[in-house]
Amino acid sequence: MSTIGFVGLGNMGGPMAGNLVEAGHEVKVFDLVPDLVAGVAGAAGQPSAGACAEGVDFFISMLPAGRHVEGLYLGADGVLEHCGPQTLLVDCSTIDPVTSRKVAAAAQEKGLSMLDAPVSGGTAGAQGGSLTFIVGGTSEALGKARPLLDVMGSNIFHAGDNGAGQVAKICNNMLLAILMAGTAEALALGVNSGLDPSVLSEIMKQSSGGNWALNVYNPYPGVMENAPASRDYAGGFLVDLMTKDLGLAMETADASQSSVPLGALAKNLYRVHQQLHDAGRLDFSSIQWLFKPDLKP
Ligand code: NAD
């Protein structure tokens, strides 16, 4: 069993840390919100992130954005000042690859290995220990971290060197945003032209327009019983997070001089939807409202 420091105990990090405790690891936890620290049963709450990093085999972070990750590791009294040489650092936050590489390089200068390991699978995956980890870093570091990632997830992909996990995650989410918006647009066109959304969905699913949204996450209310669309778009993957990830895609495109016209359009569609419909806390499939405003209650 390992000793683990875990910082960032929000919707994702809290249950991930809880699964590590349940698997028998000795887990030290910290969050800026004291109630979240107390909420991880069986873990040892710490007064600071630095205290979490002292003497552990692994240090894991799950924070909102790049500025939080940079502050945590490189800021005044940052985690890198507290880790011993044995500690492997694993950042599971979804952040920009530039910050991810910068923090990993600073860790390396101190002789520490670091992985970026953003996740897919949402809060249900975090609770059920069935996340997908998309990892950047060395094979050796991933080999060491694998037993822990296996506790929190069921799929582990090695995307490449440091930052590659973030790039792969960002590419995937940009594609997801585009195909969800396209699916919502096609469904609205069909319904406005007299078709039943369930019938149209079944036809497109079996035809060349078939995609993940139609298969498991239909954006039109009532078509798929277990999809967020059929529970007023509650839960799932928030519009706020999708717009954040699309912003990361735009930054990554700039940094690599890539043209991403469809990603840019998707980002603007999600931004309009977020503001026009006050939809930030709704599931991202609620983009359906932009194409079919009469669905909005
Ligand atoms: P969250 O806002 O619920 O949790 C983040 C936590 O980090 C908060 O509790 C906050 O207090 C804490 N925090 C911030 N700065 C800190 C610091 N310096 N020290 C200690 N604690 C600090 O966010 P979340 O939904 O858990 O998401 C975390 C990351 O996972 C994000 O990067 C997000 O994009 C990614 N992600 C989320 C989902 C999802 O469905 N929620 C899915 C995949 C990936």
Image: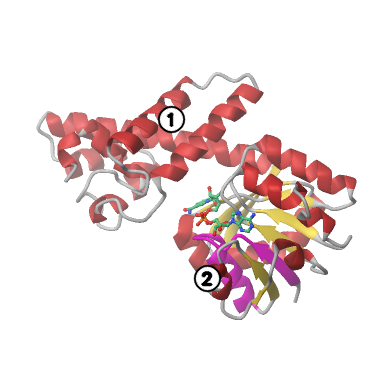
Of residues 205 and 191, the one nearer the viewer is 191
Q: Position of residue 157 (x, y in %)?
A: 64, 49
Q: Residues within 10 Å of mark 2 (few under 14, many from 20)?
A: few
Of residues 2 and 40, the one nearer the viewer is 40
Among the two numbered marks 2 and 1 on one chain, the one whose residue lies closer to the N terminus: 2
What is the span of residues highlighted in magenta in the rendered image?
Answer: 3-23
Q: Position of residue 60 (x, y in %)?
A: 69, 60
In this figure, which residue is indicated by the disc labeled 2?
35
* Colour option used: secondary structure
Say whether residue 9 is magenta. Answer: yes
Q: Is residue 241 above or below residue 32?
A: above
Which amino acid lies under the numbered mark 1 shown in the image of this protein? Lys
- Specify the quadrant of the image occupied by residue 153: bottom right
- Would residue 89 be visible to someone looking at this image? yes
Which amino acid lies under the numbered mark 2 shown in the image of this protein? Asp
In this picture, residue 264 sits left or right of residue 93:
left
In this picture, residue 128 sits left or right of residue 88:
left
The circle drawn on residue 267 is: 1
Say whether residue 199 is magenta. Answer: no
Alpha carbon of mark 2 to alpha carbon of mark 1: how far?
34 Å
